[in-house]
Each structure stands twice: as structure tokens, then as C-alpha cells.
Image (cartoon, rainbow, N blue to C red):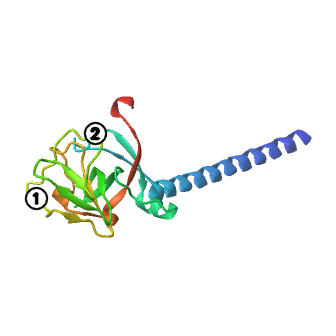
Amino acid sequence: MDEALAKRRADVNDRADLFALIRRLVVLAAVLALVFTFGFLVTQARGLGMFPALRDGDLCVVFRTTAMRLTGQRFAQGDVVAYTHEGQRYFARVTAVAGDEVELTSSGKVTVNGAAEGGDILFPTYDDGRQLTYPLLVPEGYVYVLGDYRTQADDSRDHGLIPLNQVDGKVITLLRRREL
């Protein structure tokens, strides 16, 4: 009789442990869903617009704009961002933020607030009269973005100034497709 009672207690304890584990897994799944819904976005880079910084097929982890606002962060020149335009996701580098003046010269140089763009941009930047008139003052609530591979990039020259509500967030890390 004591043996049967001990076995029943053990069965009850095993079931209680199992239910506790299931509850913890459900809570963990809910927390992860919230983090990846509001905090981070994992997406794949497409195209050559940000070559060599991002290559076609790279997996990018993006810190969402909503999470940036909660932590008091802002976009800055040089940040690589993901943004959505007409339902399609693009990647580009923030060249100018609100209050900055952008100029594209006829020789293919970019100046921001009178200073030539720095960095390792290997390709000239031509506007070809596509979308904006220069010099351009970036208003509050917008960013001006350019891809690194300027001859292949879809960016502010094509889409105009990007409203902050269309910016998905800042790329914080990536996995090269060959590393997967």
C-alpha cells in the first residue's frame, strides 16, 4: 500500500513538474515574440545597393525604431538602416538627419553642411534630376539616405526624403550568407 501511494505521489509530482515546464516555455515564447515584434527585426538584405557593407543574402538584425525611441536613441550620419518604401524593404546609409543641408555636386561628390562626405564610398553620386532639388535642407521627421554602391542603389535620390515612420530601424549586426 505504501508503495502504491509513493508511486501516485511521484506521478503527481512528475505531472506538476511537466505543467510548470510548459508554463515557463509559454512565457518564454511570449517574451521572445514581444522582443522580436517590438525590439528587433531579423531580415535578409537584397540587391547590391549597400555593397560591400551588406551583400545580397546577408541576414541582418535590425534594432527597431520603436525600441530606439524607448531607449532615447536617434539616427546619426553613417548608420545603416532598413526602411520600407511602397511595400518593399531597402537598406541604405543615413547621410543626413533633420537640420542638415545636402548637396550633390556635378562631379559626383556629396557634401553635408558644407563638408565632403567621408568614409570609403568608392562610387560617384549622381542625381540625374531624379527626385529632389539641391541644396536640400532635411526637415524634422525625415532622413536622407544613400546606398554605398551608388550606381546600383535605390535611395533618397529615387524615393525622396525618407519619413522616420518608414524607417524600420538601425542594422546592429549581420551574418554573412557564407557563414550560415
Q: Residue at x 39, y 30 (%)?
A: 179
Q: Quadrant of residue 102?
A: bottom left
Q: Is residue 33 above or below residue 69?
A: above
Residue on which disc 1 sits: 130
Residue at the outermost top position:
178
For label 1, count other residues whose C-alpha is less than 10 Å away and answer few (under 14), some (14-19) or many (20+): few
Q: Quadrant of residue 128?
A: bottom left
Mark 2 or mark 1, earlier in chain: 2
Q: Which tag is nearer the camera, tag 2 or tag 1?
A: 2
Q: Quadrant of residue 163?
A: bottom left
Q: Amino acid at mark 1?
A: Arg
Which secondary structure lies at badge 2? loop
Q: Position of residue 176 (x, y in %)?
A: 36, 34
Q: Is residue 1 visible?
A: no
* Viewer-nearest residue: 6 or 142: 142
Q: Is residue 73 left or right of residue 92?
A: right
Q: Is residue 85 left or right of residue 61?
A: left
